[in-house]
Amino acid sequence: MKKFKFTINQNQYDVDIVNVEDNTAEVVVNGTKYKVEVDKKIQQTKTPTLIRSKVEPSTDISKNVQRTAEPTAPKGVGYIKSPLPGTILSINVKVGDLVKVGDHLITLEAMKMENNINSDKEGTVTAIKVTPRQAVLEGDVLIEVGN
């Protein structure tokens, strides 16, 4: 219920709008109830629906899912990136190790929680770009995987 105060010709009116249906409004003016017909149809305001697009992380890490590649591109080649800012606690692979999708590669501490960074690619570790106790940002390359 909406309340209004009107002053018309130095007379004060307290108006409460009780109900509005189509072009008819139920109002109470200074304690007296009236039905008022409005010239134009009053449109009800609609609450907008929030539509969010699908959010993709800035890294190419997806839990245990291997990304597809171009048919001519070498399979399993790519980068393992940090999904969030943090500190490297341990590295569980070394250069030359063969990794499969889902293998535990690095333990990353972020917000006082340990996060396992797993491989989303299959191949051989060609380079490790970080060291234990190193701080990393979201999207930083941690490990390179090749054939």
Image (tube, rainbow, N blue to C red):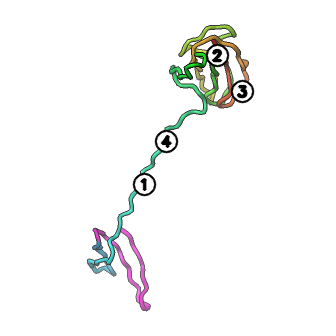
**Mark 1 Cα-neighbour bin, 10 Å: few <14, some 14–19, many ≥20:** few
At a point 38% along the width and 83% down the height, the residue shown is 13
Q: Amino acid at mark 4?
A: Ser
User: Above or below — where is 68 with respect to 4?
Assistant: above
Label 4 neighbour load within 10 Å: few <14, some 14-19, many 20+:
few
What secondary structure is marked by label 3? strand
Residue 66 visible to an observer of this rendering = yes
From the top left corner, tell me how far across and down residue 88 is, in percent: 68, 21
Residue at 67%, 16% in the rendered image: 90
Q: Earlier in the sequence, mark 2 or mark 4?
A: 4
Q: State the CA–CA distance, disc 1 to disc 2.
A: 46 Å
Please name the residue that numbered disc 1 is placed on: 48
Q: Is residue 66 magenta?
A: no
**Residue holding disc 4:** 53
The disc at residue 135 is 3
Name the main secondary structure of what is drawn in magenta: strand
> In the rendered structure, which disc, 3 or 4, sits on the residue that comes first in sequence?
4
Query: Which region is colored magenta?
Result: 1-22
Indicate which disc residue 145 carries: 2
Mark 4–mark 1 distance (CA, rounded to whole Å) = 16 Å
Q: Earlier in the sequence, mark 1 or mark 2?
A: 1
